[in-house]
Amino acid sequence: MARIILIHGAWGTRKTWAAVAPLLTAAGHDVEALDLPGHGESAVPPDQVGMAEYVAHVEAVLAGGPPAVLVGHSMGGMVIAQVAARQPARVRACVYVAALLPRDGESLLDLIRQQDARGVQDAVRPGPLRGTTVLEPELAAQALFPDASPAQAARAMQEVCAQSNKAQGDPAILGGGFAQVPRAYVFCAQDRVVTLALQQEMVARTPCEAVFTLDSGHVPQLTQPKALARILDGLAQV
């Protein structure tokens, strides 16, 4: 079985994978769900990090074991793409779940601005530290969790944290190693944050060896954990 490293998205923490990680562990995989620097239980202040710090943290974790399958959700796609570009021999595959799939030089904000939908923009508020933002719970939940129950959405919003502005504006740095690592994409058909049209456009520009579709909103690890875990399990066994 495989080593699988799970990377959350913007304003997120490792707890976003709480329903998926045990299913993958039960299937025999070695699973690590990370808090990126400035998120969750990280001791690093969120105003002190950018994309380089995210990438370096995942690289450090990756170095502590055998080559791994990297799974990135949303902003996590920006992170895993750059880790793969820098460490192709240590990354078995990258799986993008409703994720940003950049080309060299593109930032998260560059990609999000290519869609017409507002996503979570109307929910963004100034954060507790200069250079950070937080999300207004009710508006954010409508965008993030259209297919979740009110109770699911409320619990998930309790885990949302401050987000570094710098990380969202930093351009992806992709070298030749990026093309060496197999890619898979999980489309989320009801996504209001990274729209299906944008997901499909990114994959058209940067083709993936395997694609899957879930009839879910932006966070299938919350609303369809079993279906997502089946996809990840299958990919990890290839």
Image (tube, grey):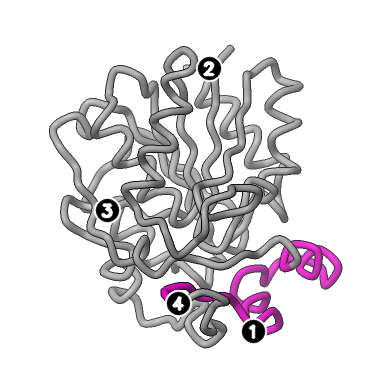
Which mark is on residue 237? 2
Point out the frontmost of discs 2 and 4. Answer: 4
Marks 4/1: CA–CA distance:
22 Å
Residue denoted by label 1: 139
On screen, 127 above or below 40? below
Q: Mark 1 belongs to which amino acid?
A: Leu
For marks 4 and 1 on the same chain, the one whose residue lies earlier in the sequence: 4
> Residue 62, position in %: x, y?
44, 24
> Residue 118, position in %: x, y?
45, 83
Point out the frontmost of discs 4 and 1. Answer: 4
For marks 4 and 3 on the same chain, the one whose residue lies earlier in the sequence: 3
Q: Mark 2 belongs to which amino acid?
A: Gln
Marks 2/1: CA–CA distance:
39 Å
Q: Mark 4 belongs to which amino acid?
A: Arg
Which mark is on residue 102? 3
Is 200 left or right of 160, judged from the image as shown? left
| Tag 4 near tag 1, CB within 8 Å | no
Query: What range is drawn magenta here?
Result: 130-157
For marks 3 and 1 on the same chain, the one whose residue lies earlier in the sequence: 3
Q: Mark 3 belongs to which amino acid?
A: Pro
